[in-house]
């Protein structure tokens, strides 16, 4: 299967300060050409953080900048930040870029589900668990998850079980993810 091609290895620098210890700046253009021949450019100067997958799923699919999907995360971050881009197109590209980067078909399916859930979560109202009586507003106890984080993990567990049993046809994978996200979306 043709999964596309990357321009090479990205050239980056870590950015310090501002509280985001994952931020990097591209020092040169970097791109991915998908199986349909579409070029996904991450231009020099782009700032990326590899965080399209909700943090609550990092233990299940991998944290930013780890594993074979690192290069895919760069072009996906830029695609998600492009005002003219369509998020679902960028998520589809991410699946194929993960395969191109060396992910197994199962890893690519789970990572694709992770970024789709990340997009879905960003559109949902934030529901939090009650805080301890002496906690400041917005503060959580160490290890305490929000209701959204618990819902995301539960949805991902159901979704990943079905993806593990599915084949590798992308249209089927997309349909499974779409069905799960539609079932989880409040009316």
Image (spheres, rainbow, N blue to C red):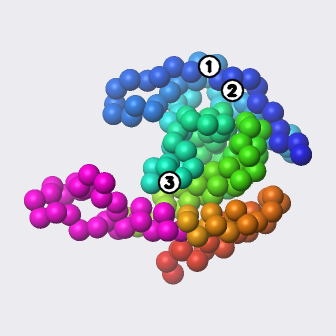
Q: Which residues are magenta?
A: 127-155
Q: Residue at x 65, y 23 (%)?
A: 10
Local crowd size for mark 1, using a 10 Å CA cut-off: few (<14), some (14–19), many (≥20): few
Q: Which residue is mark 1?
A: 11
Local crowd size for mark 2, using a 10 Å CA cut-off: few (<14), some (14–19), many (≥20): many
The local secondary structure at tag 1 comes to: loop
The local secondary structure at tag 3 comes to: helix
SS assignment for the magenta stretch, majority:
loop
State the residue in front, 118 or 59.
59
Tell which tag, 1 or 3, sits nearer the viewer: 3
Give the image location of residue 71, x and y in percent. 66, 33
Q: Which residue is mark 2?
A: 30
Q: Horizontally, is 67 left or right of 138 in the view? A: right
The Cα atoms of the two marked residues, 1 and 2, are separated by 8 Å
The local secondary structure at tag 2 comes to: strand
Query: Up-down: is 47 above or below 170?
Result: above
């Amino acid at each position: 299967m043709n999964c596309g091609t990357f321009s090479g290895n990205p050239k980056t620098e870590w950015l310090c300060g501002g509280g985001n210890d994952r931020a990097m700046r591209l020092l040169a253009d970097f791109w991915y050409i998908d199986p349909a021949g579409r070029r996904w450019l991450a231009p020099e100067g782009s700032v990326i953080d590899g965080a399209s997958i909700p943090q609550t799923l990092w233990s299940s699919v991998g944290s930013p900048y780890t594993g074979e999907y690192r290069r895919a995360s760069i072009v996906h971050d830029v695609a998600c930040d492009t005002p003219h881009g369509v998020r679902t197109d960028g998520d589809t590209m991410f699946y194929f870029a993960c395969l191109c980067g060396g992910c197994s078909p199962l890893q690519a399916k789970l990572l694709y589900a992770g970024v789709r859930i990340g997009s879905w979560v960003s559109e949902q109202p934030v529901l939090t668990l009650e805080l301890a009586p002496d906690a400041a507003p917005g503060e959580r106890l160490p290890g305490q998850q929000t209701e959204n984080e618990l819902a995301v993990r539960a949805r991902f567990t159901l979704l990943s079980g079905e993806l593990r049993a599915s084949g590798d046809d992308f249209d089927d994978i997309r349909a499974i993810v779409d069905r799960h996200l539609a079932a989880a979306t409040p009316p």
